[in-house]
Amino acid sequence: MAGPGYPENAMKILPGNCSENVLHSLNYPYASVLFNFSTPVKTVSLVSGDYGEDQDTISVTAYSGENGSGEIITSQTLVLEEDASGCLEFNLEAEGIRSVIVFGESSIEGHNNTIFTDNLSFCR
């Protein structure tokens, strides 16, 4: 459940702003959150957010292959402003989604991917 090259402790379950327990990626290079689907899906919804100490640009990208491989099918990018802790809702819809990567880019150097992800839902 983390991107290429991640250390084994790159993810933790922590209290978050979206719900009591969220999947929190830590500040490691490529520690984006990765979801693989055993068969293709056509809709993916999730929330992602931050605790507000920096501005975060969060991108959710859907791919035609597993592990973020193949063609980019669709993506959505939203910005959570500095001092605005909370959750952003992402909704992707396209045929043939096999994997989704959630990536956070921080306005503070060295803080990329210190975001949380929650409430994943999908339909075939």
Image (cartoon, rainbow, N blue to C red):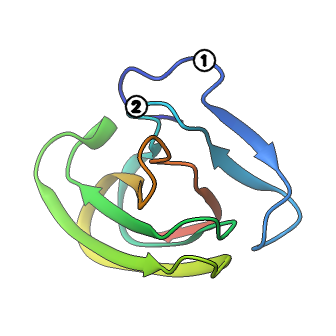
Please report the residue visible at 75 percent of the width from the left and 74 percent of the height from the top.
18
Is residue 17 visible in the rendered image? The answer is yes
Q: Is residue 114 above or below residue 97?
A: above
Q: Characterize the local packing of mark 1: few (<14), some (14-19) or many (20 or more) Cα atoms within 10 angstroms.
A: few
Pinpoint residue 92: horizontal percent, then vertical percent: 35, 76
At a point 41% along the width and 66% down the height, the residue shown is 58
Judge left or right: residue 118 versus residue 34: right
Front-most of 51 and 63? 51
Task: Name the residue nearer the viewer: 14 or 61.
Answer: 14
Query: Residue at (10%, 52%) from the top-left corner?
Result: 71
Residue 108 pos. (x, y %): 46, 54
Q: Amino acid at mark 1?
A: Glu
Residue nearest the observer in this picture, 73 or 4 = 4
Q: Is residue 8 above or below residue 30?
A: above
Residue 124 shows in this picture:
no
Residue 95: x %, y % from top left: 23, 70
What label does residue 8 carry, if any?
1
The image quarter containing residue 44 is: bottom left
Label 1–label 2 contact, CB within 8 A: no
Q: Quadrant of residue 85?
A: bottom right
**Residue that label 2 marks:** 29
